Amino acid sequence: MARQSLIVGDIQGCLPGLRKLLMAADFKPDQDRLYAVGDLIGRGPDSLGTAEYLMSLGDNFQAVLGNHDLNFLAVSQGLKRARNSDKLGPLLKSPKLPDIINWFRQLPLAHKLDNDIVLVHAGLYPAWSVEQLLAYSNEINEILSSKQWQSLLKNMYGSEPRRWSSDLTGIERQRFIINACTRMRYIMTGNQLDFENSCHPNDATEDLIPWFKVSNPALSTEKIVFGHWAALHGETSSTQFVGLDTGYIWGQKMTALRVETSEYITVDADKV
């Protein structure tokens, strides 16, 4: 049994920040468990080093995929052009690239811990139960792990459909699942996903509702731990919905949740 379990918010290739945070939490790689809510790489100064370090933790590390992680996979296959802001150059040139690609391909979109804590990068779509979320995550994970993975990545881009239906099939179904798990922030009328706005809810128009403020009769007592929304500053006004993206890549903080005590550990970004 692990001495402690930590869940860290968006790392985004900021290995120095991650090391500083783990030191503050007294993290011991041979005794503790580390979880992450996605966006492990991308935009930060050392995506290669971050991936290598997390892979080195072996079974003591578990993560879900974020949109930047999926973007890396697509870029690695020539399906999308890397942006300068992605800062993926050293990673894409690494001789370890094939192993890193295969490691990312095994990560799910959602993961449930033994104590009813659910990890997902963007959140839980309000029309889904946790069981549905995990089942849909498995659908995508099976394709990512198969020979069809490149086709999935090639066709995942786009914002339609914006509303879930169990009748969705093929790439439309797959795209919605990926978007709900990795891009969602606001919900519009009829449980439609909004992809145009990322501001703090205090600055949003009335027609935009944060996904965690939308009533979800299918959700019981599970705690949903997510990242993705730096402008939120982790503010959900609820202990059931825990936002861990506190904007380290934007010069703010990196945050981890200690599972055993519900304690938050934070470190400030280094000022440039």
Image: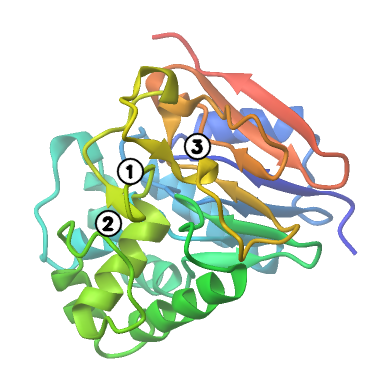
Residue 97 visible at all:
no
- The local crowd at label 1, few if under 14, some if 14 to 19, many if 20 or more residues have their Cα within 10 Å, is many
Q: Nearer the viewer, residue 214 or 46?
A: 214
- Residue where numbered disc 3 is placed: 15
In the image, what residue type sits under mark 3?
Answer: Leu
Image height of 220 relative to 141, above or below: above
- The local crowd at label 3, few if under 14, some if 14 to 19, many if 20 or more residues have their Cα within 10 Å, is many
Question: Which color scheme does this rendered protein use?
Answer: rainbow
- The local crowd at label 2, few if under 14, some if 14 to 19, many if 20 or more residues have their Cα within 10 Å, is many
Could you say which quadrant of the image residue 57 lies in? Answer: bottom right
Label of residue 72 in the image: 2
Label 2 sits on a secondary structure element that is: helix
Left or right side of 264 for 173? left
Q: Nearer the viewer, residue 85 or 189?
A: 189
N-terminal of the pair, mark 3 or mark 1, is 3
Farthest residue to the top: give it.
271
- Residue where numbered disc 1 is placed: 42
N-terminal of the pair, mark 1 or mark 2, is 1
In the image, what residue type sits under mark 2?
Answer: Phe
> How many numbered discs, if any?
3
Residue 214 visible at all:
yes
Name the mark nearer the viewer: 3 or 2. 2
Could you tell me which quadrant the C terminus lies in?
A: top left
Would you say the residues marked 1 and 2 are in contact, meaning their CB atoms lie under 8 Å apart?
yes
- The residue positioned 37% from the left and 59% from the top of the image is 180
- The residue positioned 58% from the left and 27% from the top of the image is 235
